[in-house]
Amino acid sequence: MIKVLFICHGNICRSPMAEFVMKELVRQQGREDEFYIASAATSTEEIGNGVYPPVRKLLRAHGMDCGGKTARQMTAADYDAFDLLIGMDEANVRNMKRICGGDRDGKIKMLLDYTDHPCAVADPWYTRDFEATWPDVNDGCRGLLRQL
C-alpha cells in the first residue's frame, strides 16, 4: 500500500483539496486498495477545524464530499508512517523538514514537482482565488498518480 500525506500550512484549504482530489482519482481507476491518502498541517492554527467553506463548495461542485475532515498537525512520526509527504509550497517543505528532523529518505516533495510547471501552489487563504488553486492541485495529483 502506498501512503501519501498532503501538507499545507493549516490543513483547511490546499492539502485537503489535494487529499480528496487524489482519493477521487484513485477511486476512478479502481485502485483504492493500493493507497492510503490523508492530509495535515505544519501549524497548529486550525487544528480541529473543518475544511474551509469555499474549498468544501469547490470539492462538492466536482462531486467530492469532504465531510468529517478536520485539520490536524503533522508529526515526526508521519515521516515513518507515510511513503510520500507532499507539500504545497517552499515554506511547507521547510516546516515539514523541521518537524521531521530532515528528509533522510527523500520522501518530502512539492505537489507541482509532478507536473510540467514545478512551482508552489498559491495559497487561496491569501489570494482568495480558490478556483485558481483547483487546476494546480488537480494537475499535481494527476502527475503524482501517473508516477505511482
Image (cartoon, helix red, strand yellow):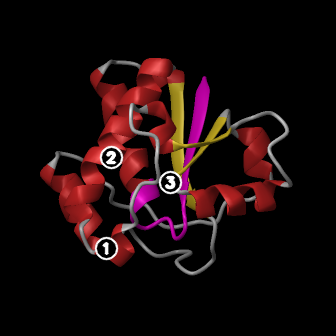
Q: Secondary structure at mark 1?
A: helix
Q: In this view of the protein, can residue 138 be seen by the observer?
A: yes
Tell me the number on the disc at residue 88: 3
13 w.r.t. 21: above or below: below
Magenta segment boundaries in residue numbering: 1-15
> Considering only order in the chain, which callout, 2 or 3, is on the residue closer to the N terminus?
3
Q: Type of residue at label 1? A: Thr
Q: CA distance from mark 1 to mark 3?
A: 14 Å
> Considering only order in the chain, which callout, 3 or 1, is on the residue closer to the N terminus?
3
Q: Which residue is mark 2?
A: 136
Q: Type of residue at label 2? A: Asp
| Quadrant holding the N terminus | top right
Residue occupying the far bottom of the picture: 45
x, y (%) of residue 14?
41, 59
Q: Check disc 1: other Cα within 10 Å, few if <14, some if 14-19, many if 20+.
A: few
Q: Classify residue 105 as left or right of residue 87.
A: right
Dot 1 and dot 3 residues touching (CB under 8 Å): no
Quarter where residue 69 is shown:
bottom left
Q: Is residue 2 magenta?
A: yes
Q: Classify residue 40 as left or right of residue 18.
A: right
Tell me the number on the disc at residue 11: none
Q: CA distance from mark 3 to mark 2?
A: 10 Å
Tell me the number on the disc at residue 127: 1
